[in-house]
Amino acid sequence: MLTTGNSDPAAPKSVVVGTGTAQTMVLDEFGTIELGWTGAESYQFSESTNQGLTFSAPSSLPMKTQVPAPPTGPAIAVERNGTIDVAYACLPSDCTGHLGNQSVQMIRSTDHGTTWSAPIQISLPTRGSGFGAQEPVVAACGSGVTVAWQDDGIGANFSATNPDIILVHVINGVPGTPLNLSNSAASEGHPQIAINSQSNVFVSWVTDNNQGGGTATDSVIFTALPNCGAVQK
C-alpha cells in the first residue's frame, strides 16, 4: 500500500488500495470499510478494519469482468451478521440461465472476503429480451439484502427494448419473489437504493419517456416500500 504525498501539509493523506476503476464502497455497522472495483482482468476486493489506515491485500473476486468494463463496479452490501454480498451484471457467455441474455448475479462471503460462494442468479427472466439485466444495486435489509436492477426480460410490458426496474429481497442467498417497480411502456434505468433501520426501502430511477429523444422529457422517479421490499404472499 502506498501513502501519497500532498503539497498542503494540512491536507489528509491518502492511500493506494489497488489498481483499477469503477470503485464501490460501503461502511458496515461494525465500522469495517468494504471496497470493490473493476481491475484489468477481474473484480477486486479489499477491506479496512481500522477506518482506512490500512487495507487488506486486494483479492480477485470469483467472477469475470465485462469487456468493455461497465461504468459502475460491483455493488456491495454487508448483512447484519457480517456476511458480504456482491451483486454484479454477468454476460451470457459467462453466466447462463437468463434466456441467452445478460443476468444479475450475486456472490457472498461469510469470512471477510477470504472465501466466496458460487454465483447466485438474482434476475429471473420470464421471456426473451433485448439485453437482459444490468445495473444492480444492493443494500442490507432485515436478515438479508435487497437488490434492485434494470431488466427488460420480466414484467407485463412485452417490449423487448423497454426495461423495467425490478426489486427482490434475498435471505441467506435465496431470492424471494421479484417485484416490478415500474412496469410501464417507457424505458426505466439507473436505479439507486437506500434502506433505513425500520426496513423501509427507498428506490429511485430515471424514466426515459421519449425513448432516447433527449433528457428534457426524462423523469426522476422515487418510491418507498416497507418490509425490505418483500412480496407478501
Image (cartoon, rainbow, N blue to C red):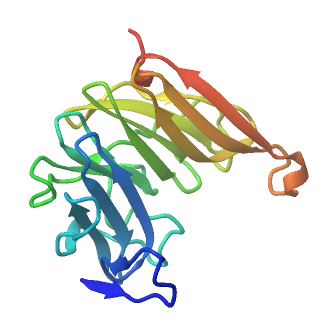
Which quadrant of the figure contains the N terminus? bottom left
Q: Tell me residue 142's x, y (percent).
A: 30, 24
> Is residue 135 depicted above or below 66 in this figure?
above
Q: Position of residue 64 (x, y in %)?
A: 30, 70
Q: Nearer the viewer, residue 33 or 184?
A: 33
Residue 90 in sight in this render: no
Where 80 sits versus 212, above or below? above
**Could you say where residue 170 lies in the image, as x and y percent from the top left?**
30, 32
Residue at horizontal 41 percent and vertical 52 percent from the top: 103
Residue 193 visible in rendering:
yes
Q: Is residue 1 left or right of residue 122?
A: left
> Farthest residue toward the right?
216
Quadrant housing residue 203: top right
Left or right, residue 13 beside residue 190: left
How many marks are shown on the rendered structure?
0
User: Which quadrant of the structure image shows residue 125?
Assistant: top left
Residue at 50%, 69% in the rendered image:
70
As drawn, 198 above or below 137: above
* Farthest top residue in view: 233
**Quadrant where the C terminus is found in the figure:** top left
Q: Nearer the viewer, residue 186 or 225?
A: 225
Q: Is residue 115 above or below residue 85?
A: below
Residue depicted at 46% across the width and 84% down the height? 9
Q: Residue 189: where, in percent of width, then height?
A: 63, 48
Q: Determine the residue positioned at 85% across, 55% down.
A: 215
